Image (spheres, rainbow, N blue to C red):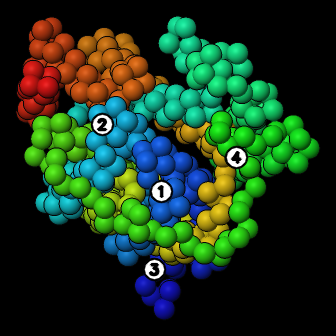
Amino acid sequence: MLEKFFRLKENHTTVMTEVLAGITTFMTMAYILAVNPAILGDAGMDRGAVFTATALAAAIGTVCMALFTNYPFALAPGMGLNAYFAYTVVGSMGYGWQTALAAVFIEGILFIILSALNIREAIFNAIPANLKEAVSVGIGLFIAFIGLQNSRIVIKGNNLLELFSIAGYNRAYNVEASFKNVGITVLLAMIGILVTAVLITKKVKGNILWGMLITWFLGMVCEITGIYVPDPELGCDSLFPDAIGSALIPDIRPVFLKMDFRSVFSLNFAVVIFAFLFVDLFDTLGTLMGVSVKAGMLDEYGRLEHVKGALMADAVGTGVGAMLGTSTVSTYVESAAGVTEGGRTGLTGLTTAFLFILSLFFAPVFLAIPSFATAPALIMVGFFMMANVVNIDFKDLAEAIPCYICIIAMPFFYSISEGIVMGILSYVVIHLLTGRFKEKKISMLMYICVILFIIKYIVL
C-alpha cells in the first residue's frame, strides 16, 4: 500500500530510507516545541496549551503536505513569524494575543484563496529579489536580538542597552540578583551559543536541538552542585521537569478557538495581516525552492510540479494552527536534513508528523527547557537567516540602500512589519526620485503598498 500511494520505486527510495529521513527532519526542527511556547508565552499565552497547539499544527500541516504533494517537506509554526506575533503585534502594537490569532487565521484563509487562484506566485514575483533577501536578513537580526534579551546577555542600561553585569542588572530592574541565580544563567547561555555553533560547524544532525539540551543539562548539573540556586521571584525556576503527571498532554483549551475579530476592519490590523502574509509568502516559497533544488525536484524550467499543493498545505496549516492557538505555520528549511538523508516522498513527512504527535506525551520535558537554553537556538536561527545577506546586490545602491533600511529597521524599531514597510517605501521612493523606476519596472502592487503605508502614517 505504501509503495502504491507514495510511489517509492518511482522516486528511487525505500520505506526504511523514508522513515530515517523523517526522524532526521524531526530531530532538526524539534526545537520549535520548546521555543514556540516560550515566545508566545511572552505574549501572555498559556505555554502548555501553546505546546500542544504547536505539536498538533506541525503534525496537521506536515500531513497535508504529504497528502497534497507527496513531497518530503515538514511544516511547523515559523520562526520570525512567532516573534512578530509576540513582540510586535502584541508587545509593540498593543493588540491582545486573541486578536493576533485572528490575524493569523485571516492570513490562512487569504492564502487558501490566493493559492487556489495561483495569485500567490504572482505576488512573490512582484517584490524585488533583493528586498526579499533583506526581509530574511532583518528577521534574523531581530530573532537574534530577542535571544540575547531572553538570555539576559543584553540588558537595559545607561546607553539604552549594555552587556550583562550583576550590578547593572540589579540597577536596571531594581532587584537583588547574584551570580548563583541570574548570573550563572547568562554564563550558561553564552556557553550554549558556543556549543551550538560547534555542533553546527561539525554538521551534527539536530545540532540546534542538541545545543539546547546540552545547555539545559549543564544547568541541571549546576543546580545539583549548588552553583545555580533557583529563585522564582527573579524568574529563576528549578531546571528539572515536573515528573508528576508527565504522561498528561497539556490542555489546549486556554488557546483553542480564542480568535478575537473585533479589530478586523482597522487600518493597523490590515498592516498586521499584510506583514504576516508578506513574511510567510517569501519564507515558504523560498524554502520550497531551496529544498526542492537540493532534492532535485525541479523540472527543466526550474519549476516545482506540485507547488500549488505545497502552498495550499501551508495555507491550511496556518488556518488550522490559528484555530488550535499558535502563530503562522510555514514550511521548514530543516526539511533539507531529511532530503539529505534520502527522503523523497510524503512518507518522510508522515514519519515527522507522527513524531510530533508522539512528542505530546513528553510535554514536561520540552516545557521545562529554560530561556537561557532556548536563547542559543534563537541566535543560531538568526545566523542562518542572516546568511542571505550575501545574495543582496550591494553594487547597485538604489537596490542596496532600501535593503539596508529594511534590515536595520527591524531590530531598531523592534518590529518586523515596520522593517518591511520601510524597505518597500524607501525602495519605491529612491527609484522614483532617481529615475530608475522604468528600468526596474516596479510592479503596481508596490505602488499600491506605498500609498497604503503613507495613509497609515498620516492617519495613525
Question: Residue 210, image x and y in percent?
Answer: 72, 50
Q: Is mark 2 on a helix, strand or loop?
A: loop
Q: In which quarter of the image is the C terminus?
A: top left
Mark in front: 3 vs 1: 1
The residue beneath circle 4 is 237
Separation of marks 1 and 4 at Cα, in angstroms: 17 Å
Separation of marks 4 and 3 at Cα, in angstroms: 47 Å
Q: Which amino acid type is shown beneath numbered disc 1?
A: Asp
Separation of marks 2 and 1 at Cα, in angstroms: 18 Å
The residue beneath circle 1 is 46
Viewer-side residue, 417 vs 352: 417
Of the image marks 3 and 1, the number of the one nearer the N terminus: 3
Q: Which amino acid type is shown beneath numbered disc 2?
A: Gly
Of the image marks 4 and 3, the number of the one nearer the N terminus: 3
Q: Is mark 3 on a helix, strand or loop?
A: helix
Separation of marks 2 and 3 at Cα, in angstroms: 46 Å
Q: Is mark 4 on a helix, strand or loop?
A: loop
Could you tell whether 270 is left or right of 224 in the image?
A: left
Mark in front: 2 vs 3: 2
Q: Which mark is residue 94?
A: 2
| Res 95 seen here | yes
Viewer-side residue, 231 vs 240: 231
Sort mark 1 into few (<14), some (14-19) or many (20+) by Cα contacts within 10 Å.
many
Q: Which residue is farthest right?
A: 225
Separation of marks 4 and 2 at Cα, in angstroms: 28 Å
